Image: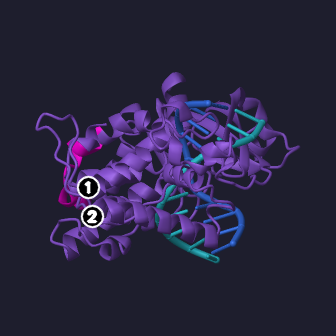
Chain colours: A purple, B cyan, C blue
Amino acid sequence: MPWRRTLDPYAVWVSEIMLQQTQVKTVIPYWERWMRELPTPQTLAEAPTDQVLRLWEGLGYYSRARNLQRAAIEIVERHRGRLPDDPAALLGLPGIGRYTAGAIASIAFNRPEPILDGNIIRVLSRIHAVPGDPKAGATSRRLWNLSGAVVAAAAQLPAVRLPSRAPLVFSGNCSMANQALMELGATACFGTIPRCGVCPLRDRCRGFQSGEPTRFPQIPARGASVSRRFATVLWTHRGRWLVRKRPQGGLNPDLWELPNLEIGADADADTAIARWIGIPASKLSFHGKLRRTVTTNRITEDLFRLRHPPTSRMPSGELRWAKPAELAILPMMAKHRALTETSEGA
DNA sequence: TTCCGGTCGC
DNA sequence: GCGACCGGAA
C-alpha cells in the first residue's frame, strides 16, 4: 500500500478517509491521483470543489470529499497548513471522528492513541471473547479500552528498528502496533472464514479456544430495505446532454446527474416523465433499467431516451446543456456518467 | 441479494 | 442510540 511508504500526515489522512468506506485495491489509484493533483493541505484548500468531487467520483460518500476540503481550509487557517498531532485537535476537524483522529495521531505521529475499526473490533472481540453488540455503549467502551491497552503496551517496549531498505515505514511502536492489529484483521482474522491456522495470537485467543471464533463479534442483524422507483430521462439536443446539479442537503449534494423523478410503485414511468416535462409519451424510448442500493433503499431507475429541444416545463433545479467535453469535467454520479459514455450523444 | 463500514445529524 | 450516506465484494 503506497501510503505505508510515507509518514506525511496529509497523505496518511487522505488514505484513512478513503479507506473508511472502500477496499484497499479500489483506493490505490484514487489515492495516487489525489496525491498527484492535490499534494498538500494548501492545494486542497484552494482547489475548486468541482475538482475535488471529480477526484472522488466513484468512491461514494461524497460528503467525505467535501469534509476533507473543509478540514484542509481549517488546517491552513488555524494550523499553518500542517495537520495537528494532537488527537483532540484532529477530532475537531470535519470528517474526522475518533477512529481517524487516533489513526493519524498513532500512524503518522506515533502517539499512543487507540483505534477501533471494523477489523480491530473483530480481532479484539475474538481474542477476548467479548459478548454483545460491539457498537453498543458498554461493549464499545470495553473494546476501546482493550485497544488502548495494546497501544499503551507498545509504547513501553523498546523501539523496534526496521532495516533501512524495508518496504514500509513506521513512525514508531504505536504506529506499528495499531497497523498490526488492522493487518491481522485484514489478512487472517476474517469475518466468515478466519485463518486461525496462521494466526500468531491463536494460543491466546479465547474465541479460538471456544472452538467457534466466528461467534464474535456479535453484530445484530440489519433491518429490512425499502423499494423505491425513479424515472430518468437521457435527454439530448444538438449534441448536448441535459444534466442537473443535485441540491445541497440531500443525497449526493452538488453532483450532476441525468434528470429524474421519483414515481410510485405502480406508476407508468414514461407517462410520469411526459407529464413532468410536458411532452407526449410517444417521444420517449425505453433505454433500460438501473438498480442500486443506498443504505436501506433498493432503488430501481427506469431510463428513457429523448431527443428534443427544451420545453416550457423543464425540470426544477440547476440545469445545464453540456457538451461531452463539459461532462468530462463535471462531477457526476458514476452510473449516469457511464450512460452518457455508452449512449449516443446527438 | 446481502453484507460491509466511520462520521454526522437528529 | 439510530439511520443516512455510497459502491463494491462476497
* In magenta segment, residue A34: yes
- Looking at this view, name the residue that lies furthest to the left: A164
Q: Dot 1 corresponds to which residue?
A: A173
Q: In this view, does A66 lie above or below A88?
A: above
Q: Callout 2: few (<14), some (14-19), or many (20+) C-alpha neighbours within 10 Å?
A: few
Q: Residue A156 bears which disc, if any?
A: 2
Q: Where is residue A151 in the image (x, y as percent from the top left)?
A: 36, 61
Q: Earlier in the sequence, mark 2 or mark 1?
A: 2
Q: In this view, does A222 lie above or below A192?
A: below
The residue type indicated by label 2 comes to Gln
- Looking at this view, name the residue that lies furthest to the right: A266
Q: Quadrant of the N terminus of chain A?
A: top left
| Quarter of image, res A214 | top right
Q: Where is residue A76 in the image (x, y as percent from the top left)?
A: 20, 69
Left or right side of A182 for C4: right
The residue stretch that appears in magenta: A32-46
* In magenta segment, residue A33: yes
Q: Is residue A271 visible?
A: yes
Which secondary structure, mark 2?
Answer: helix
Picture residue at 74% right of the left edge, 42% below the top: A274
| Quarter of image, res A25 | top left
Picture residue at 23% right of the left edge, 57% below the top: A9
Q: Give the Cα separation between the discs numbered 2 and 1.
A: 9 Å
Picture residue at 71% right of the left edge, 43% below the top: A299
Pick whichever, A180 or A287, lies toward us.
A180
Total residue callouts: 2
Q: Where is residue A234 in the image (x, y as percent from the top left)?
A: 60, 34
Q: Callout 1: few (<14), some (14-19), or many (20+) C-alpha neighbours within 10 Å?
A: many
Which secondary structure type mostly characterizes the magenta part of the structure? helix
Task: Name the subunit of mark 2.
Answer: A
Task: Name the subunit of mark 1.
Answer: A
